[in-house]
Image (tube, helix red, strand yellow):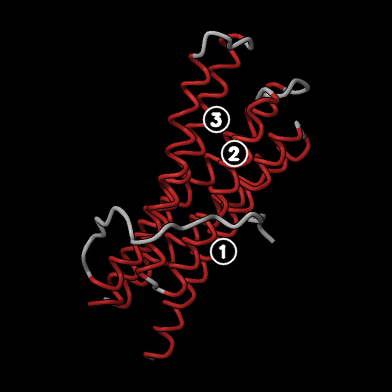
Amino acid sequence: MRDAYHDQLDLLGGRLLGMTRLVGEAMDQAGFALSETDAELAAEVIAGGARLSRARQEAEEHAYAILALQSPVATDLRVVLAATQAVGELDRMGRLAVHVAEAVRRRYPEPVVPAVLIPRFVEMGRIAVWLAVMAGKAIETRDVTLARTLVSVDDDMDDLHRTLFTVIDYQDWAYGPATAVDVALLSRYYERFADHAVSLARQTTFVVTGRPDRAETVPGQTRVPADTRVG
């Protein structure tokens, strides 16, 4: 009986890992669609939102069934509670990736981002995908140190988001107000995606210690690898 119970907990963890892969792939593809003005790929990302919604529903139902039927305690209870929180974070991450794809489709055949800003958004996409992948690894391994390193990398995303407004406000901005709005919104989508990934990773600390993680940084400088494409 206990073996079956722990199998259910493992299956719940597997569902979360599957969702982290889905949202990482969605943002990876949305970013490529943005940089290449690829409307077909953007449409695939949008259609994939339904798959993520089903995954969320299945994970939530699974977690609630464990709570109702198994009455978990201590660490097991924290695992289930963290999972219910993580499902919501992952759902929001998936929706943000869809928003990026929707912006590409909305402006097609014109690019949604001026060419001069493409490298900035490519970098934001790399960071976003890396954070999603690492958040999944933190959940899988329950590595508190890994979870906390994500905060330092999120600071890089925050810097890219904040300094973008300096570019938009610059007197030589020549792309019009509509493009400025698109660029600002897209940057916000990436920044919020990163925030949710960090919040997701912090659930690891709650599971291990039983206390919310309020750590701001960890010693050392973490760099995002150059190749962060999923798969």
User: CA–CA distance between discs 2 and 1?
Assistant: 18 Å
Q: In the image, is residue 111 above or below residue 42?
A: above
The amino acid type of the residue labelled 1 equals Gly
Which x, y percent locates residue 150? 42, 56
Q: Which quarter of the picture shows residue 221?
A: bottom left
| On-image quarter of the N terminus | bottom left
Q: Earlier in the sequence, mark 1 or mark 3?
A: 1
User: CA–CA distance between discs 2 and 3?
Assistant: 11 Å
Mark 2 falls on what kind of element? helix
87 with respect to 202 (left or right): right
The residue indicated by pointer 1 is 18
Mark 3 falls on what kind of element? helix
Which x, y percent locates residue 149? 40, 60
Which x, y percent locates residue 24? 58, 53
Give the class, few, some or many, for how many residues have Cα within 10 Å of label 2's Cα (few <14, many ≥20): many
- Asked whether the beta carbons under mark 2 and mark 3 sit within 8 Å of each other, the answer is no
Which x, y percent locates residue 231? 69, 61
The amino acid type of the residue labelled 2 equals Val
**Which residue is rendered at x = 45% and y = 51% of the image?**
153
The residue indicated by pointer 3 is 186
13 with respect to 121 (left or right): left
Q: Which quarter of the picture shows residue 226?
A: bottom right
The amino acid type of the residue labelled 3 equals Leu
Give the class, few, some or many, for how many residues have Cα within 10 Å of label 3's Cα (few <14, many ≥20): many
Q: Earlier in the sequence, mark 2 or mark 3?
A: 2
In the picture, the disc for residue 203 is: none
In the picture, the disc for residue 98 is: 2
Q: Which quarter of the picture shows residue 81?
A: bottom left
